[in-house]
Amino acid sequence: MFNPKEIIHILANNVRQTQSPFGIPKFMANTWFKDLALPEKGEYLLFTGLMYQFAPYIETSTQYLEKYEDTPMADYLKYAKYVPAYLSGIGLALMTPGKEKKKARQPLKNIAFLLEQSKVDFCYRPDLDHYSGILLYDMGDQAGFVAHAKKVAHRLQQAGIKKIITIDPHTAYALKELFPKYTGIQFEVTPYFELLDLDPKDCGIEVTLHDPCFFGRYLHVSDIPRKVLSNLGIQTSKIRNQGEFTSCCGGPAESISPALSNDIMDKRVKELETTGKPIIAYCPICLGNLKKSGANVEDLSSLLVRHA
């Protein structure tokens, strides 16, 4: 296991310098929208929080952490704080395969398509789409989180934003629960799947839904994706730990201990695979972590686009 304080210090320093926990400039990470003609005005602002965009970089950095965990080389991690965040971020971006970056963009395109199909009046403003800072909060750097959250909240407020569509559980929880508490600024926050209005179908298939902790345990919205799937004739298997009692995929632990993360992941995958059905995730962290196991898993948006 790595020293948690060193990890937190590096991530917090990156956020302060670049608004990204990995130091990657936003113009390099957030490119998914460039070949789409998305409206710039609408009732809702589509706010990705950059979590799907960061997923391939998380995978690359985790591969290096796995290599050096519990070795003498792990002690040198503390010197990473002396490297300028932009420099380390650009290095990480260059080490990450282009095909993985392309894959990470697809769920975002899927979600935009589904919102358009559902006739949701939304817009996308890349200048207003920022990382929420949730990882700092999760790892105990409350002061760092609050400082960052205030910057993001004020930018949104100054732009006149009132209604926000989120696409991942971490960003949804940050904006819906933490921003009002720590910044005093409140928005109407809605996960994208709550706004979907797709034509009924009779697909006649069954899948196993892995509920992210924030959507299942804390925001209590895990029943909504099931209703959306049911409307398309897609059944969801029943497993022991689901909904408000879901089990963690192990992803949140990977920056501290890839070994611990893999242990948690293996237990969850075994539980999900007992149904023998394809596994569906609706969180970029869960999706990436479950895929590492070799499990048959895809993003909820991909399944919906295929059958909408």
Image (cartoon, grey):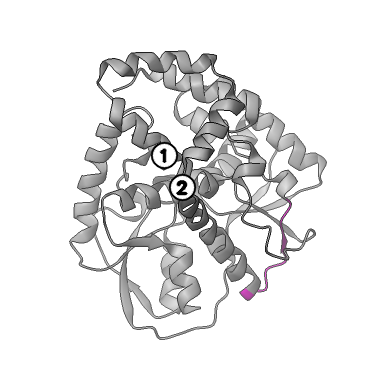
Q: Quadrant of the N terminus?
A: top left
Label 2 element class: loop
Work out whether residue 254 or residue 148 is closer to the camera in this orientation and state it. 254
User: Measuring 25% from the left and 68% from the top, which residue is drawn there?
Assistant: 277
Residue 72 figure quarter: top left
Residue 156 on image: x %, y %? 74, 42
Q: Which residue is mark 1?
A: 60
Is residue 273 shown in magenta?
no
User: Measuring 66% from the left and 58% from the top, which residue is drawn there?
Assistant: 33
The amino acid on which the numbered mark 1 sits, given as a three-letter code, is: Thr
Work out whether residue 244 or residue 156 is closer to the camera in this orientation and state it. 156
Q: Mark 2 and mark 1 in contact (Cβ < 8 Å)?
A: yes
Q: Is tag 1's residue or tag 2's residue first in the polypeptide sequence? A: 1
Count residues near mark 2 (Cα–Cα under 10 Å), then give few for <14, some for 14-19, many for 20+.
few
Residue 246 on image: x %, y %? 32, 50
Work out whether residue 246 or residue 207 is closer to the camera in this orientation and state it. 207
Label 1 element class: helix
Please indicate whether residue 188 sits to the left or right of residue 273 in the image: right
User: Measuring 57% from the left and 33% from the top, which residue is drawn there?
Assistant: 90
Q: What is the magenta range?
A: 117-125
Residue 223 on image: x %, y %? 42, 62
Residue 150 figure quarter: top right
Residue 98 on image: x %, y %? 50, 51
Establish if 286 lies above or below 6: below
User: Measuring 25% from the left and 21% from the top, which residue is drawn there?
Assistant: 70
Of circles 1 and 2, the one toward us is 2
Is residue 123 shown in magenta?
yes
Q: CA distance from mark 1 to mark 2?
A: 9 Å
Please indicate whether residue 63 sits to the left or right of residue 57 in the image: left
Q: Which residue is mark 2?
A: 97
